[in-house]
């Protein structure tokens, strides 16, 4: 499951503008994607312990 999440994150982060069609001239959408992924990793790690 984590492999799928990683693949989806990389796909959206790298090619999200072409796939979804959003406009991100300032990079705020990419920053939000990165923050969501990082917080998901942190929460997932803490939940396993």
Image (tube, rainbow, N blue to C red):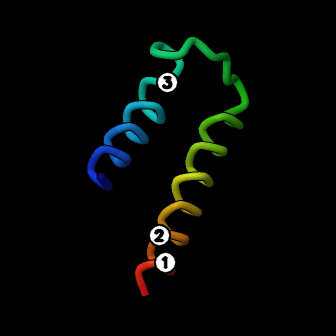
How far from the left and from the top, in percent, is residue 17?
Answer: 53, 18
Nearest to N terminus: mark 3 or mark 1? 3
| SS state under label 2 | helix
Q: Secondary structure at mark 1?
A: helix
The answer to the question of whether label 3 and label 1 lie on touching residues, with beta carbons closer than 8 A, is no
The residue under the point 29% across, 52% down is 1
Q: Position of residue 27 (x, y in %)?
A: 66, 34
Q: Nearer the viewer, residue 47 or 8?
A: 47
Q: Residues within 10 Å of mark 1 (few under 14, many from 20)?
A: few
In the structure shown, which secondary structural element does the residue marked by tag 3 occupy? helix
Q: Is residue 23 above or below residue 30?
A: above
Query: For mark 2, what is the residue?
Result: 44
For disc 2, the neighbor class at 10 Å (few under 14, some 14 to 19, many from 20) is: few
Circles 1 and 2, Cβ within 8 Å, touching? The answer is yes
Q: Which of the two marks, 3 or 1, is nearer to us in this view?
A: 1
Real-space CA distance between mark 3 and mark 2, rounded to the nearest whole angstrom: 24 Å
User: Distance from label 1 to label 2 (Cα)?
Assistant: 5 Å
Image quarter where the C terminus lies is bottom left
Mark 3 and mark 1: Cα distance apart in space: 29 Å
Q: Residue at x 38, y 37 (%)?
A: 8
19 left or right of 38? left
- Picture coordinates of residue 42, whole percent (x, y): 52, 71
Q: Which residue is mark 1?
A: 47
Q: Which residue is mark 3?
A: 16
The residue positioned 47% from the left and 35% from the top of the image is 13
Instruction: Looking at the image, tell me whether mark 3 or mark 2 is earlier in sequence order.
Output: 3
Q: Give the residue at x 38% y 32%.
A: 11
Q: How many numbered circles does the render carry? A: 3
């Amino acid at each position: 499951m984590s492999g799928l999440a990683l693949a989806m994150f990389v796909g959206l982060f790298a090619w999200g503008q072409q796939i979804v069609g959003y406009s991100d001239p300032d990079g705020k959408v990419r920053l939000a994607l990165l923050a969501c992924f990082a917080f998901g990793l942190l929460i997932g790690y803490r939940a396993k312990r």
